[in-house]
């Protein structure tokens, strides 16, 4: 465990009433964890290959629909604390650009590419500001 105190970063059950399905409620959580795992920001307990196959289903089946601080490395947690709210804002902006609801962003390569680029830029800026 990366931290001694267990804290939720995001929970699918917090979104379920608005989203209507676990897939819709957890898509943005899965995307974030998938991206973090690919950058070495997830805990070693997570398999980046399994996450890449279907990030949403991974969060549902392996994380019980929740993203906890123990799911990320220390740096991943610090970054999530600094950027996760802005990430949620970008999810909303991306959905709006597609003319869909926040929970209707597609689970496809274009969505992964969009958030990979957005999160990579945010991570680079965050790291530069720490230096």
Image (spheres, rainbow, N blue to C red):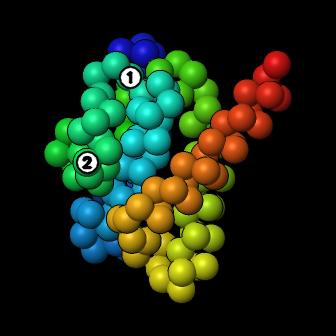
61 relative to 108, above or below: above
Spatial distance from mark 2 to mark 1, Cα to Cα? Answer: 18 Å
Q: Nearer the viewer, mark 2 or mark 1?
A: 2
Quarter of the view holding residue 8: top left
Which residue matches tag 1? 43
Residue that protrudes farthest toward the left in the picture: 61
* Residue visible at 62% across and 61% down in the picture: 90
Measured along the vertical axis of the image, is residue 70 above or below residue 52?
above
- The spot of residue 84 in percent (x, y) is 58, 46
- Tell me if residue 116 comes above or below residue 81 in the rendering: below
Quadrant the N terminus occupies? top left
Q: Which residue is mark 2?
A: 53
Q: Is residue 109 visible?
A: yes
Residue at the image position 60 percent from the left and 79 percent from the top: 97
Task: Residue at the far bottom: name it.
Answer: 99
Q: Which mark is residue 35?
A: none
| Secondary structure under the numbered disc 1 in the rendered image | loop
Where residue 125 appears, as percent x and y from the top left, is 77, 37
2 versus 113 height, above or below: above
Q: Nearer the N terminus, badge 2 or badge 1?
A: 1
Whether residue 82 is visible, yes or no, is no
Q: How many circles with numbers are drawn on the protein?
A: 2
Q: Position of residue 87 (x, y in %)?
A: 59, 53
Characterize the local packing of mark 1: few (<14), some (14-19) or many (20 or more) Cα atoms within 10 angstroms: many
Do the residues bearing badges 2 and 1 touch, measured as CB atoms within 8 Å?
no
- Quadrant showing the C terminus: top right
Q: Secondary structure at mark 2?
A: helix
Q: Quadrant of residue 91?
A: bottom right
Q: Residue 64, percent across and down?
A: 22, 43
């Amino acid at each position: 465990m990366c931290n001694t105190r267990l804290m939720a970063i995001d929970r699918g059950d917090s979104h379920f009433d608005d989203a209507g399905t676990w897939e819709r409620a957890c898509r943005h959580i899965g995307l974030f964890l998938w991206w973090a795992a690919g950058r070495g920001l997830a805990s070693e307990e997570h398999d980046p290959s399994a996450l890449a196959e279907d990030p949403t289903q991974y969060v549902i089946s392996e994380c019980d629909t929740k993203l906890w601080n123990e799911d990320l490395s220390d740096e991943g947690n610090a970054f999530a604390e600094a950027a996760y709210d802005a990430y949620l804002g970008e999810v909303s902006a991306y959905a709006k650009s597609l003319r869909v609801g926040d929970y209707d962003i597609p689970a496809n390569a274009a969505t992964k590419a969009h958030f990979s680029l957005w999160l990579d830029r945010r991570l680079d800026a965050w790291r530069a500001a720490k230096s």
